[in-house]
Image: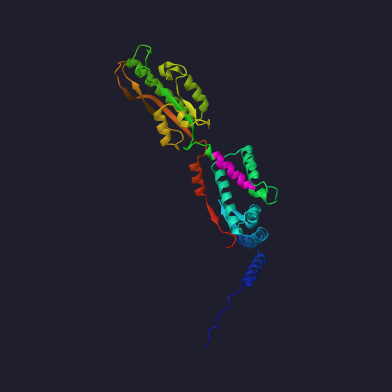
Amino acid sequence: MDEIKEEEPSKSKQKINAFGRLLNLIKKPLSRKKILAIVLLLIILAGGGFYAWRNEIFVNKQAKLTQQKGKVVFIIEGTQYREADVKQYSEFITKYMEKDEEQATKAVFELLKYKTAAEKAGINLSQQQIKDQRETLDKQYDALNTVAQYNKWAELESYKMAVELDLLTQPKEDTLKGYSFTFWFAQHFDYVENYTPPEGYGNQKKITEDKDYAKQRADYYHDQLSKNSMTYDQALKEIRADTKLCQMYKTGANFSVRFGADPTKFWKDQVYYKSVIDYIDSNSASGFSDVRSGKTSIFKSASEDAPREETETYYYFVNIEGKSSSTKQSFDDILKSLNTEYVGVNK
């Protein structure tokens, strides 16, 4: 005799059974456990309904978006560009440059990648820069610059032209910006022609005092800036004004500096000491450094045939804020590293 298998209840029957159990619970005196069970059951039922409703809304929204704007043809840094988004730029290319739809879409893809990379690199163009290149483009396309499809394409193309011109004016190397603070202590052993320090050269007591004072002030300002107890500009002003931290105790002979703020000057031409330049060059992303000692080439004797010697003559620390401009190389690196996906119109 064949074994009779019990039929598995359908989903609709399962729901009816759930509601049946709920009604049975309600008919009976409600204990605390029963109340909690009822609440939990209601939450489960409501959650399932909300999920289904939300999923349906999302699917409908996506279907409507695809119907209105077409499929996704490429993605740049997470931003999806659909057929309708691209067409406003590509129409001019297909109609007047004799390119097919796929070629035109790829051209727009490259233009939008370029714009995204420029924004990511922090290239801030003025309206005048873009306007100047738009005027150049308008002259180049004099016979076509009044057609309806021209403006949107020209918007991207003139932006690219302005970026390319801006990059040509930037230095070949990265332009860094920040602060360099120096604390000179070689007043009594750096022999300078026509100058004699108080109590003469080679006075060991004064040499020790100068070095101790420079270290104490370096530690003090480093600590104050670490705690945000003063601004960098305030510290710069005070250090430069302290003649005991200047070469030959001379006002204006302390070479602490705010470097890279002027884009027309290369940062290495603004930082005075080679040790500081070398440190910044090899630690361009280090931020706020510790207090370090630097060397200069000095005469340690007044003798005419005395050689120059590399000697520790100052303390210093720096705060590197980052790049003050984008070079062509750094821009190209960003452009290549963009997260993109090209789908195309014919796939």
Instruction: Tell me, yes or no, whether the highlighted magenta stretch contains residue 156.
Output: yes
Q: Quadrant of the C terminus?
A: bottom right
Colour scheme = rainbow
In terms of depth relative to the viewer, which is nearer, 341 or 49? 341
State the image coordinates of residue 193 (x, y, percent, origin top left). 37, 15
The furthest residue to the bottom = 1
In terms of depth relative to the viewer, which is nearer, 265 or 258? 265
Number of callouts in the render? 0
Above/below status of 129 relative to 90: above
In terms of depth relative to the viewer, which is nearer, 199 or 268? 268
Q: Can residue 138 be seen by looking at this rendering?
A: yes
Q: Can residue 230 be seen by looking at this rendering?
A: no
Side of 133 where 234 appears, left or right: left
Side of 222 where 122 appears, left or right: right
Dividing the picture into quarters, in which one does residue 132 lie? top right
The furthest residue to the top = 199
Mostly what secondary structure, the magenta segment?
helix
Q: Which residues are magenta?
A: 154-166
State the image coordinates of residue 143 (x, y, percent, origin top left). 68, 48
State the image coordinates of residue 202 (x, y, percent, origin top left). 32, 15
State the image coordinates of residue 10 (x, y, percent, origin top left). 61, 73
Dividing the picture into quarters, in which one does residue 38 lie? bottom right
The furthest residue to the front = 143
The structure residue drawn at horizontal position 41% and vertical position 19%, both measured from the top left corner, is 247
In terms of depth relative to the viewer, which is nearer, 240 or 260? 260
Dividing the picture into quarters, in which one does residue 71 lie? bottom right
